[in-house]
Image (cartoon, helix red, strand yellow):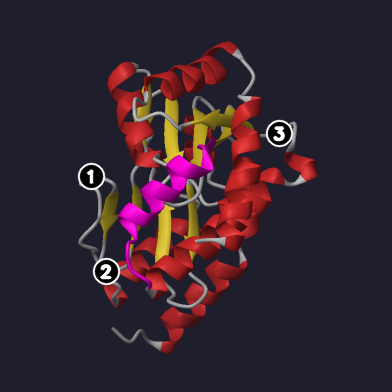
Amino acid sequence: MTLSSRTQKRLQAAHESEATYQPNKEVAALLNQKTLVMIIGPAAIGKNFIIDTLIKTDPTFGFVPSFSTREPRTNDEPGSMHLYLHDEVNVNRLLDLIEAGGVAQYAIHPTTGHIYGTMTEDFSRQFALLPTLTTAVESIQQLPFNKTIPIILAASPQAWKARFNQRYPQKSDERNRRRAEAISSLVWGLAAERRDTVYWVDNTSSDPHTAVQRIINIVKYNHQGDPEARKHAERMLELAVDEL
């Protein structure tokens, strides 16, 4: 749906302000009581499976659904998104909320103009689980959460390749995009400046409980990540570049 020039200008202004966004005092006070656990990793690494198992294992963890003005997708996980029409009424309503500092965080897609973000009412548990793109980590860490913990999932190259090929069996634009995103995600996580600022967790096994317990130990008991998972990621990057 075509938006008015006024609304498009508001969207552009919101996009330019993303990196410096700060919520209002009421929202900031709520976020200050929460620990945000960012679950990061390439496509088919098992982020949603881990999150689902973690929530069932420990009730102090809760999933944070996002909102968006994008179109629904057939593979959307039930309850994972609050979807609004990308029209004058909904876009301006969300922009009013953003400009008032009334959302936890947001982003405007640079090409589609679709709005993405999270509402404060969706932070229902002490430890909030949010699947996170690497491009959003730094801006989220500037928000007034009590603590933010970036956790990157990795797996043996063989296990990840099998999952990736199962999800994207045919050559397609979608497969190419996911491969490019995987490379970008792994390069980001493996950067030298992040060696001591992110936590790696091995999700090779089809049984998620070992990975889930490691995440609980990291978040609640300040345990370290898994060095073997980082080694997996190095080999996953080689695989993504050379074979996928």
Residue 50 image point, x, y percent: 37, 32
Tell us which disc is closer to us: 2 or 3: 3
Image mark for residue 79 = 1
- The image quadrant where one finds the N terminus is bottom left
The relative height of residue 54 versus residue 240 in the rendered view (above or below) is: above
Query: Is 157 contained in the magenta span?
Result: yes
Residue 42 image point, x, y percent: 49, 50
Q: Residue at x 36, y 70 (%)?
A: 92
Q: Earlier in the sequence, mark 1 or mark 2?
A: 2
Crowd band around label 2 with a 10 angstrom C-alpha radius: few (<14), some (14–19), many (20+):
few
Q: Circle 2 sits on which residue?
A: 71
Callout 3 secondary element = loop
Residue 120 image point, x, y percent: 40, 40
Q: Which residues are magenta?
A: 153-171
Residue 90 image point, x, y percent: 29, 68
Amino acid carrying mark 3 in the image: Thr
Q: Circle 3 sits on which residue?
A: 197
